[in-house]
Amino acid sequence: MSIQLPADWWILVVAALLVGGVLAAGFASRLRLPGLLLFLVLGMVIGDDGLRLVSLGDPRIAQIGGTIALLLILYEGGLTTKPRDLRAGALPGSLLATFGVVITAGVVGAGALLLLDVEPMTAFLVGAVVASTDAAAVFAVLRTAPLPRRLAALLEVESGANDPIAIMMTIGLIETWRASPGVADWAGFAVLQLGGGIAIGALVGVAGSWTLMRTNLGPDGAYPVLALGVAGLSYGLAAAAGASGFLAVYVTGLIVGAQVPLHRRGIRTFHQGLSSTAEVGLFLLLGVLVFPSQLPAVIGPGLIVTAVLVLIARPVAVVLCLVWLRYRWQELTLISWAGLRGAVPIVLATFPFVAGYPDGLFIFNMIFFVVLVSAAVQGSSISLVARWLGLRANATSVGSIAENVPIASMNTELIEVRVTDELHIAGRLLKDLTPPQGLITAILRGSRVLIPSPRTRIRSGDLVIIAVPRHSTASKRVTAWARGEQPPPSGQRSVDKQPR
């Protein structure tokens, strides 16, 4: 006698795939292979052409799932982008995210038209679909690849902001096939997508930040859930207005990440977990959707499109957009090579398929093959190329240096400082350091908790905990102190007066 619910089998399969995929990704990182590539392959193995554990015959399901996953990935990318890096990468990243996408689409489309036996509409649909870099792939690589922050910031901004242009071109070309929109229709569509996405994303971000900072929700775990709701509102309102929901949710993430220091740690941790799960699920889903037996027919065209994209289109777009900003040739080369393709082009490739375009299946299979090659070749060699070009940076923590930890309703909060070798305070005695407007209360070193004294020396890897009066700029002041960017404010209590 037993009871089985309809969801039991699916829960078991999904859990097994998540566990197996994450463990495989950890193993792949040791071999310097992109983990997302393994998820795609795993999806192909369990799909209709493999073990037939999961069947996905409707591409609309993949399109819906892909949209939700991209929303989570872009929002997390915005949340974790530092304002300093955003300012550094805003101009070049925006140029690549707009003009660069159009140039890439045009060059790839022209190459496909000249080198492949396809219709002009098919050629330029291929160019539009594959024109944008992928936020999931780029963010995943930047977590481990030690690239200079100037270049990493540019790639983050580009990958987070270039999807709307590619979506706009793809939908516009499909509508051109269905009807005959004029120049005014294209211009209005572009303005609404970009302008509306930025405006709605900014408004929702400001309102969401105000709510998160001033609303007492009780348990700390409620704030990440509210932040997730803010992301959904941003995307939904923008989509309802005909604007770009993807751009809106990225802008909202940037604002919430910069303006909500009080609950930043919990919000980021929660959404990093969601984003990682979304990446795994998205690539598994897209792998299940494809039929490996159909890929041999597109190997030739796929290699041609990949060569045009990687060796011609991307470098031309990078040079035309960035050469005026005094980037060195080594930097231009690395930026060109780091233009990874991933889930976004595959999701976009479902648009012609779902719309009933005659070459929709051909486009989907070929784009899937292009992404496989891009992930395998470019994704696995970025660190090697950076080293060859002399642009390999020292690995640093991608998280914030100082994190706010609120203490109930008291007007005090704890600031956690993760000490790394490049920080000013590393290797120094506490008697020589005075934190701004605060008191060092404890130092966590491995599994030990140290009670600080004037002769305690801070080491790389320590977690220094400082109690400070609650203020919106508290973490910024502590960060500047840890970096040695400003002297301690006068009149503050010195650490050497702490009880031993």
Image (cartoon, grey):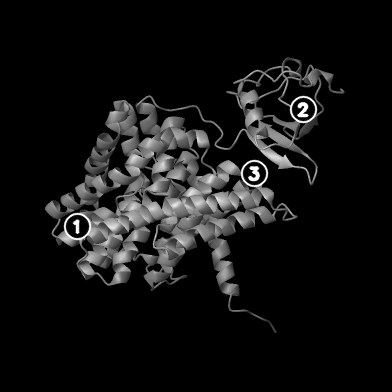
Q: Amino acid at mark 2?
A: Ile
Of 2 and 271, which appears nearest the observer? Answer: 271
Query: Does residue 97 appear in this view?
Result: yes
**Which secondary structure lies at badge 2?**
strand
What's under tag 1, amino acid-wise?
A: Ala
Q: Where is mark 2, residue-wise?
A: 440
Report the quarter where the C terminus lies: top right
For residue 145, say whether it is visible.
Answer: no
Residue of label 3:
265
Image coords of residue 376 (percent x, y) = 36, 46
Q: Secondary structure at mark 3?
A: helix
Disc 2/disc 3 C-alpha distance (Å): 20 Å
Specify whether 45 is left or right of 353: right
Left or right: 230 with respect to 365? right
Q: Position of residue 399 (x, y in %)?
A: 58, 38
Crowd tier of the residue under label 3, counting other residues whose Cα lies within 10 Å: few below 14, some 14–19, many 20 or above? some
Q: Residues within 10 Å of mark 2 (few under 14, many from 20)?
A: many
Residue at 46% over, 49% down: 35
Give residue 91's position: percent from left, percent from top: 38, 36
Residue contact between numbered discs 1 and 2, judged by CB atoms under 8 Å: no
Q: Quadrant of residue 121?
A: bottom left
Which dot marks residue 123? 1
Report if the CB atoms under discs 1 and 3 are less than 8 Å apart.
no
